[in-house]
Image (tube, helix red, strand yellow):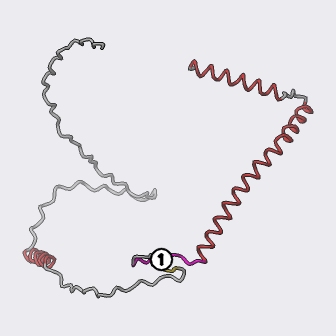
């Protein structure tokens, strides 16, 4: 058996007691402004309208009359009084909701639960439509792939002939592949170096 070496133990210093920070409650200065009075655009011959002077603080509002206080108290008392609403007891028989003409109900076997289901004509129409659309999509994609395989060589040969007629050099398949390989190697080197 191999004995494990005894590791030295170190005593960590105690953490200093730091006082809790005292945070002040946030305060906000409410924005205030003096309203601007902009007179309407006046004609040149109209004399200017004098701006209203800032008035001194108005006298305190007179106390509300006692009859107004009494009316408020009566309104509050009436609001707190119990409403005179009679409760109508529910009848023992529930009224079934009428079903639409396109819906039939199927009772789940072994339970009394009725599940509304669309009629068979609607279900068959929806299923037929979905099957046709999915089939058409799959057929179109496979036909498109096949057409690309057939026409790609023809388009490449046509492009090469046009290049020859224009007097530009046409690279062969091997030269194209060699240049792509060279481009990939350079990109790989650049990615490894991080430049």
Residue occupying image coordinates x 61% and y 77%: 121
191 sits left or right of 150 in the view? left
Does 117 lie within the magenta span? yes
Q: Which residues are magenta?
A: 112-120
> Please, what secondary structure does the residue beneath circle 1 have?
strand
Neighbour tally class for label 1: few under 14, some 14-19, many 20 plus, Cα within 10 Å: some
Query: Could you tell me which residue is drawn at 72 percent across and 52 percent down?
Result: 141
Q: Is residue 176 above or below residue 27?
A: above
Q: Would residue 159 appear left or right of 90 to someone viewing this image?
A: right
Q: Nearer the viewer, residue 179 or 29?
A: 179
- The image quadrant that residue 53 belongs to is bottom left
Outermost residue on the front side: it is: 1
Q: Which residue is mark 1?
A: 116
Give 81 or 116, whichever is nearer the viewer: 116
Q: Residue placed at 30% from the left, 52% from the top?
A: 35
How far across and how far down the image is residue 24, in percent? 17, 37
Please identify the quadrant where the N terminus is shown. Answer: top left
Q: Position of residue 163 (x, y in %)?
A: 88, 33
Q: Position of residue 41 (x, y in %)?
A: 43, 57
User: Can you give x and y, in whole percent of width and height, for residue 79 in the image?
Assistant: 16, 77
């Amino acid at each position: 058996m191999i004995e494990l070496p005894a590791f030295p133990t170190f005593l960590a210093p105690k953490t200093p007691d730091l006082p809790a920070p005292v945070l002040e409650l946030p305060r906000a200065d409410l924005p205030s402004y003096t309203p601007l009075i902009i007179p309407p655009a006046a004609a040149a011959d109209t004399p200017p309208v004098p701006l209203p002077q800032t008035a001194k603080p108005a006298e305190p509002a007179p106390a509300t009359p006692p009859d107004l206080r009494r009316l408020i108290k009566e309104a509050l008392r009436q609001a707190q009084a119990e409403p005179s609403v009679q409760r109508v007891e529910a009848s023992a028989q529930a009224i079934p909701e009428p079903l639409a003409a396109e819906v039939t109900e199927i009772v789940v076997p072994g339970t009394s639960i009725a599940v509304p289901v669309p009629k068979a004509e609607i279900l068959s129409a929806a299923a037929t439509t979905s099957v046709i659309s999915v089939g058409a999509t799959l057929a179109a994609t496979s036909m498109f792939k096949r057409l690309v395989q057939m026409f790609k060589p023809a388009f490449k040969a046509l492009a090469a002939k046009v290049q020859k007629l224009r007097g530009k050099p046409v690279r062969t398949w091997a030269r194209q592949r060699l240049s792509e390989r060279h481009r990939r190697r350079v990109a790989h080197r650049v990615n490894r170096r991080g430049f």
